[in-house]
Image (spheres, rainbow, N blue to C red):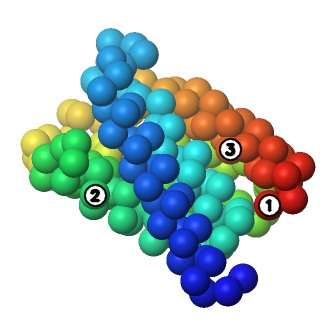
Amino acid sequence: MRKTRKLTLMALLTAIALTIFVVENQIPAPVPIPGVKLGLANIITLITMVLLGKREAGVVLLVRILMGAMFAGSPSTLLFSAAGGLLAYLVMCLLVGRFGSDRLWIVSALAGIAHNAGQLLACVLVVKTPGVFAYAPVLAASGVITGVFTGLAAQSLLKALKKLKF
């Protein structure tokens, strides 16, 4: 893929991910549990990883996290998004090639757990109490549920793009 086309596609995917992130922050949480959200912008991270590669997905994720914190958050948003995003990204890098694009829901579920674990670790560093880990089972369950959903969405989008011969 030519450099200009690749850069343009990365910019487009970043803009889509950022838009999803900002819109999702405006929607009330699906459940009244702090820290639980769908993580729809991760659909774009998965799609970028499959279409363009791990490095490019990392760049899209990093820019989305930085700009998302500027537009819709605070320094704590940056800390929690970065911690969760980094661990989720590492899990995706390790697993996306092993499971392939037809089983992204598995990769996404495991990345969802990793994302919530990263956020818990960041929280422990901020509040300086390991008691926060009591919240881990709830976040692990939500990571699986939301991860399966976003993974299935990414799979569907990739199938549609394949039909369009993208």
Packing grade of label 2 (10 A; few <14, some 14-19, many >=20) is: some
Q: Position of residue 109 (x, y in %)?
A: 61, 40
What residue is at 45 percent from the left and 71 percent from the top?
59
Q: Which corner quadrant of the image does residue 99 belong to?
A: bottom right
As shown in the figure, which amino acid type bears the numbered disc 3? Ala
Nearer to me, 129 or 108: 108
Q: Which mark is residue 110?
A: none
- The residue that mark 2 highlights is 67
From the image, which quarter does the C terminus lie in?
Answer: bottom right
Q: Earlier in the sequence, mark 1 or mark 3?
A: 3
Q: Nearer the viewer, mark 2 or mark 3?
A: 2
Residue at mark 2 to residue at mark 3: CA–CA distance: 22 Å
As shown in the figure, which amino acid type bears the numbered disc 2? Met
Q: Is residue 134 left or right of residue 139?
A: left
The answer to whether residue 3 is visible is: yes
Q: Which mark is residue 154?
A: 3
Q: Position of residue 51 (x, y in %)?
A: 71, 65
Q: Secondary structure at mark 3?
A: helix
What residue is at 49 percent from the left and 54 percent from the top?
88
Q: Which corner quadrant of the image does residue 21 belong to?
A: top left
Q: Earlier in the sequence, mark 2 or mark 1?
A: 2
Q: Is residue 149 left or right of residue 122?
A: right
